[in-house]
Image: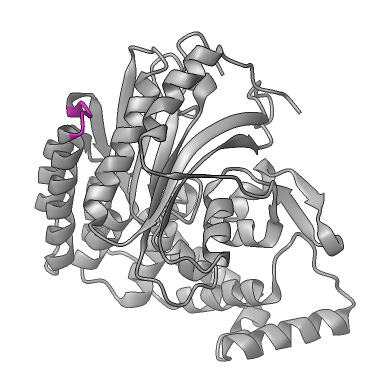
Amino acid sequence: MRLERSIPAEALDAIRAPLLAAGAAPTDAPVLQPLGLLLDLAGEAMRSRLFVVSGDGGEEAALRPDFTVAVARQHFAGGESAGRYRYEGKAFRVAPRGSDRAEEFLQIGVEAFEAGDPVAADAEMAALAWAASVAGGRGDLSLVLGDVSLFAAFVDSLDLAPPLAARLKRAFAKPRQLKAELDGSSERGLAADEEKSRIAALLAGLPEAEASAVLQELWSLAGIEPVGGRRPAEIARRLVEKAETAKAGRLDAEQAAKVRAFLAVSDRPEAALDIIASLAGPNDGALKAAVAGWRSRLSGMAARGVPLERATLAAAFGRAFGYYDGYLFEVRSAALSDERPIAAGGRYDGLPGKLGVSTTNTGAVGFMVRPARAYAGGGE
């Protein structure tokens, strides 16, 4: 496991300082996290980046790839409704093949589970991340902004059939799948999959619990032992989705052109919002509200010292962690590749529900900073 190079203590103190002023309680979280849960939340594509180990009781676990899920689990397990936490510790990810990236590295960050104005909280988190990044001494920083929910609101404006709209939204963070939708090849592929997968068709008409039980019985009859940490209910749900989406149809040429135009938007934030608003379809109420929220968010960021002249709003920008469902950002350095952000964060209001928290009126937003990348003398 490749270790990250350390940085001078005074540099780390400077990078840490904005977080100390954020009114967050210090916390730590278990290094081992349930593998199945991480895959459910972050997506199957994350598997190759995880260090998998045998946890307590023989269940598969993974070394925490970041702190968001770990801190959220700990917060809600304690029965708290609201809280703001500051963390500092090691995270672990397998480096891509041929890469020299560190696989054990220091992250610092803040996670906030709070009621109140989410737009103001978004602006605050971005400003804290920017201040911490700047404190590392680099003069070549820029800010990339995005929003998963903005794409969802745009799709809703097109007034598509609900199954097709849902499929497009799920494809947003999966470039190959989204390309297939826009190229018109997805319907043929899905139809072929439906023909091949009689199990999916069998499960499609059943309640989730019953579908899970049927799948487990089929495994038992076939003598199959599932591996990889995926729960039967999750596998059954994905098979059902596969069967249902095959019947959802596809975009026509005009609709596909509009989606392509939306995804191509990348400009200074206010200019980007103007273009996005001009692309709206007939059902544009949610998109108008989302654009207005973004203008307020930008004002809040500027008031907190974020230089918007260094910011780009990229409509197609997404993050690998699938639990983010709203506002997103990354702080980048021109000296490092786009795949090595100095800071990153966003909103994940849906995560508590995915963790089994049935009643909460709090939002969820946070960010992390990689001090070794922020440090002007660092290169990782």
Q: Residue at x 45, y 29 (%)?
A: 341
Q: Quadrant of residue 18?
A: top left
Q: Residue 46 placed where, x, y %?
A: 61, 48
Q: Is residue 15 magenta?
A: no
Q: Nearer the viewer, residue 348 or 147?
A: 348
In the picture as drawn, the residue positioned furthest to the top comes out as 377
Residue 232 makes an appearance in the image: yes
Does residue 57 appear to the left or right of 293 in the view shown?
Answer: right
**Which residues lie in the magenta part?**
304-308
Quadrant (top left/top right/bottom left/bottom right) for the N terminus = top right
Q: Looking at the image, which is closer to me, 142 or 167?
A: 142
Majority secondary structure of the magenta segment?
loop
Q: Which image quadrant is residue 130 in?
A: top left
Q: Position of residue 229 (x, y in %)?
A: 73, 62
> Which residue is found at the position 44% from the left and 78% from the top?
247
Q: Identify the residue at image location x=62%, y=57%.
A: 39
x, y percent for residue 17: 41, 26
* The quarter of the displayed image where residue 362 is located: bottom left
Quarter that holds the C terminus: top right
Residue 197 relative to residue 20: left or right: right
Expressed as whole percent of the image width and height from the top left, the position of residue 150 reads 26, 55
Q: On screen, 86 above or below 133? A: below
| Residue 172 seen in the current view | no
Identify the residue shown where x is 80% and y is 49%: 53
Decide which of 47, 282 is in the foreground and name it: 47
Q: Is residue 279 left or right of residue 101?
A: left
Q: Is residue 307 magenta?
A: yes
The relative height of residue 338 versus residue 156 in the rendered view (above or below) is: above
214 w.r.t. 79: above or below: below
Asked whether 323 or 24 is in front, the reply is 24
